[in-house]
Every structure is written in structure tokens, then in C-alpha cells.
Amino acid sequence: MTEIIHSLSPLLPAHPFDIVMIPVQIFILLFTLYFFFIGFCCLWRRKEKKILTPEKNFAVVVAAHNEEAVIGQLIENLKRLDYPDELYDIYVIADNCSDATAQISADAGAIVCERTHPTKKSKGFALEWMFDRLFTMDKEYDAVAIFDADNLVHPNFLKEMNNRLLKGDKVIQGYLDAKNPYDTWVAGTFAIAFWVIDHISHLAKTNIGLSACLGGTGMCITTDVLKRHGWRATCLTEDMEFTMKLLAEGIKTTWAHDAIVYDEKPLTFRQAWNQRRRWAQGQFDVAHRFIPTMLREGWRRRDIRIWDGCLYLLQPHFLMISTLFIIISYVQLAFPPFYTSIYKFLPSQLMTVIMIGQYVLPMIILIKVRAKLKAWFYLLLYPVFIYSWIPIIFLGFIHRNEHEWSHTKHTRAMSMDEVVGDATRDFRA
């Protein structure tokens, strides 16, 4: 016992502020190690024997608000998917539109459902309205595939989702790629961030049996799950809300690495800022509403996937705590020590590996997605994108109870042929 106390003595409170700072440092260290370990689990993929026979039928739903610039290209793309025409229908929700979105969609061959509501204007409300309509139709669908109007979809998308459904998956997220990764440095760094998350979070967690998280588009959900549990996800990040609601009930989100959707990335820093601020507000909102329930359910079900979901929701809180810790650390440099740093007692090799890994992983992923040379140049600006999250997170926390929807305007009209010709990212390593 004496030896144990002696080994821990460097971490026993030596300053009054240690009562706060030692737990904070332990939290930061454990949180970092946890996600660092998960991140490196993306370096392989489990082998899979795919079911190639089309069986499931889909309602392909596109949520659109004033998207006349891009909606036509998406519908044309969806009509050319490598899947039997009789097994999927294309629905466009023309939600509170004041432009030609509905007319363009109808002319392109989609089934248009126009919706108008004076206050409930977010994508979550539009999807909830659309699902209620689907359930009253004579035709029944096995699953709903959801896209944003600015997307383009890989021809094999429904084939991949059919494969996952036939294997018993209920809630599936596809690979979120970029439609325009080389337009501007903002679009480029945004694309890198998505490629990184696709691998170090979604693929990595799938490899070790944890749950992925829905990403707002490229999603597939069985109609029986929607009917049984209801959508009821109408906050600023409806995808995360629905993910955590189901996860708390023991239903995980699976990852379809080869079901690729190409998403339009913001062209300007202001667009990227506004979009990410909305995400931050929504994540704080979801975290504060769902974490208590998920902690209880994780214990009751003895399900580590639910607890991992809690840690996922806590990432903005982790960034805030880490930022405050760094500021306090710089303050301590100007004064006599007023707290004990646990980092001086940790192996220096461990900290070196963590620091190097933060830069090596994105480089490995750029190689895996076969990114162009321009993306490697954008990698130099990637820290600007990452560190700009700090003020965004604090603003998101301050405004976490505000629910006003901020629409991102989409203007980058491209065909699938242009996307495939512009990048060689059709197959994931």
C-alpha cells in the first residue's frame, strides 16, 4: 500500500487548484487516448461478401428548399442509378419554396410533394411530414433513402444499401464524399475533414462493432423503424438527434463504405462558419437532452455502443475544456506554479505519438482516397479549418437553445460524369 501511495504521490494535490486541474487533465488525457485508439482502427476494412441481387424497394426522398440551381442534376443522376426502376421512386419535398424547385423537379420526373408551413421550416420537420405521407400511401416501401438537393449519388448506392438491408441492418449511413473538393481552399479543407471523419470515426467504429452516426444525407432507414419509433427529430441537427434516439433504444447505425454520396461543400469561409455554427448549436442541444438517458440505458443494457455515443456527443465540450486548459497553462507560465501538471509524469513517447498521429492520419487518408495534388496543398491550410472550430464551439454553446434554421445556399451544379471525371474516388481502400 505504501508503494502505491508513493507512485501516486506526484498526482496528489500539491496546490489548492489541483482539486480542479488534476481531474480536468485526466479527463483530457483519457478522452484523447480513446479517440486516438479508435482513429487508428480505420487502417483496415473487414472483408465482406456482398449480396448483389436487388430485392428491397426504396422511397428515395430529397429535401429541397429553393434549390432550383442544383435539383435538376440530382434527379437526372438518381434516375440513372444501377438499380431496377420498378424498385425505387424519387420524391422531392419542395419545402416552403419560392423559386422553381417544384417545377424543375416535376419536369425531371420526380414525384413532387409541396409543403408550406409558417414556422416549422427546418429539414427535420419536412422529413417528418413526408414520412407521414408515405405511410398512408397504398404502395409500401422497405426503406427510405434520404438525400439533400445539392448531392450527387454513386450509381451503386441503392445496390449497397440493398446489400446492408438484406443482412439485417436497419439504419445505415453511406460514405460522405465531396462533389467539389477542388473549387476553393474552404471547400478543399471541408472535404478533407469529411474524408477524415468517414475513416477515423465511421469506418473505424464499424471495424470494432460500435455505432456510426447519421450524416444528414446518404442515409437509409427501414420503414418499420420509422413506423415503430417515429421520426420526431426536428432540431438543427436532426440526423444526430435521430441517431441518438435510436441508439438509446439499442439500435445502432451501420456504415456502408461503398454507398457513396457526393455533397456540395461551402465555397466561402462565411458559409462554412454559419453551417458549422448550426451544427455546434444542434450538437449541444442533442447532448444536453440525450446524454442522461443514454447513460442510464447504457448501464441498463450493458451496451458500450450507447456510452460511446455519449462520448461522441461530448466532443464539443471536450474542445471547450481543452481550450480553457491551454489558456490556463499559458497563464501559469507567467506566475509561480498554481497547479500540478500530470503531463510531466507521463512517458514522453506517448505524447510524441499522439502529436505525430494527429498529422499522420489525415495524410494516410488522403492517400487512401487518392486525392489530387491540390488537396495536399489544402492540407497545409487544414489547421485553419480545425482551429476555427474553437470560437464556433463557444458560440454554439452560448446559442444552444436557439433553433432558427439557417439555410445554406447551393449553386454548384455538376453532373455525375463531371464528378467522376474530376476525381478518382469511386472505390474506397
Image (spheres, grey):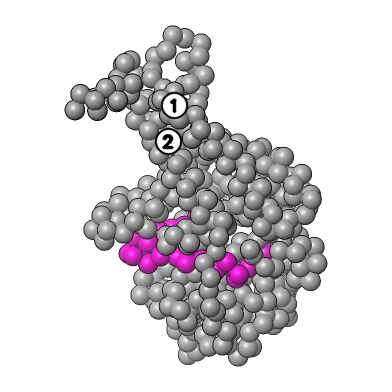
Location of residue 79 (image quadrant):
bottom right
Residue identifier under label 2: 29
Q: Nearer the viewer, residue 425 or 288?
A: 425
In-image side of 177 versus 374 (left or right): left
Please provide percent x and percent y for residue 59: 55, 80
Magenta residue check for 251? yes
Q: Nearer the viewer, residue 52 or 71?
A: 52
Disc 2 residue crowd, few under 14, some 14–19, many 20+, Cα 10 Å:
some
Give the residue drawn at x 48%, y 61%.
207
Residue identifier under label 1: 343
Give the residue drawn at x 42%, y 12%.
337
In the picture, which quadrant includes the N terminus?
top left
Pointers 2 and 1 in contact (C-beta within 8 Å): yes
N-terminal of the two: label 2 or label 1? Answer: 2
Residue bounds of the magenta highlight: 236-265
Indicate the amino acid at tag 2: Leu
Inter-mark Cα distance, 2 to 1: 9 Å
